[in-house]
Amino acid sequence: MRFFVSVLAALVAGAPALAAPASGADASAGELNPQELSIQYWAQKSGEERFDPHMCVYGVFLDKTGQHEEARRIFERCASHGNLNAMPWMSYLEENGYDRPSDPAKAAEWDKKLSDAGSSLGAFNYGLDLLRGHGVTQDRTAGKALIDKAAADGDTTARDLIAHDYDPDSVTPTADLAHYHQPQF
């Protein structure tokens, strides 16, 4: 969650660029809101052969406005070009299944890729996947090791999880419980 907040906070400065194009632009002032400042422009660019890293920030806005397929195209493209900020978004899309069925295994793969790239967020998320056995075979020892690594790298949520004896429920919002718990019979 902190990733989403930090990305959105960083993007707020660019929010005026997302305004709808003005009608009747004054030719002497130039084009006031060029098409390349719109999220639809960048969604379209995500399918082109040439990669433009500027598109990566627009995936957030596409996702948050319900344009999940377009967001996925952008995040997949950015992640394939090494953008670590796109990887948790891919995990999020795979987990929640907004534009296709939920796939916890693919979500865990993205968490692992991010962890393998040295990200404390990736270590934390993949550690939780392993602790829960969600999308991967449960391995509490490996999960704890990744949580410990994330905490050593400064992740405060990982430190909270450790303080609660690695109980995933201590850091998982109630709204997410359906993802991680099977009904008890």
Image (tube, grey):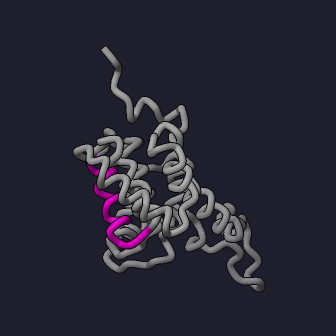
* x, y percent for residue 160: 56, 50
Residue that sits furthest to the bottom in the current view: 28
* Residue 26 against residue 104 in the figure, above or below: below
Examine the residues drawn in magenta and state their main secondary structure. helix
* Residue 94 against residue 78 in the figure, above or below: above
* x, y percent for residue 54: 51, 76
Q: Nearer the viewer, residue 9 or 141?
A: 141
Q: Nearer the viewer, residue 88 or 126?
A: 126
* x, y percent for residue 70: 43, 56
Q: Residue at x 37, y 75 (%)?
A: 82
Q: Is residue 26 left or right of residue 145?
A: right
* Residue 19 against residue 170 in the figure, above or below: below
Q: Residue at x 52, y 43 (%)?
A: 164
* x, y percent for residue 101: 31, 39
Q: Residue at x 56, y 73 (%)?
A: 36
Q: Residue at x 49, y 51 (%)?
A: 162
Q: In the figure, residue 90 lies in which quadrant?
A: bottom left
| 115 in the magenta segment | yes
| 116 in the magenta segment | yes
Query: Is any atom of residue 74 visible in this view?
Result: no
* Part of the protein shown in magenta: 105-119
Q: Is residue 77 left or right of residue 14?
A: left
Q: In the figure, residue 32 lies in which quadrant?
A: bottom right
Residue that sits furthest to the left in the current view: 137
How many numbered callouts? 0
Residue that sits furthest to the top in the current view: 185
Query: Is any atom of residue 118 visible in this view?
Result: yes
Q: Quadrant of the C terminus?
A: top left
Q: Nearer the viewer, residue 63 or 30?
A: 63
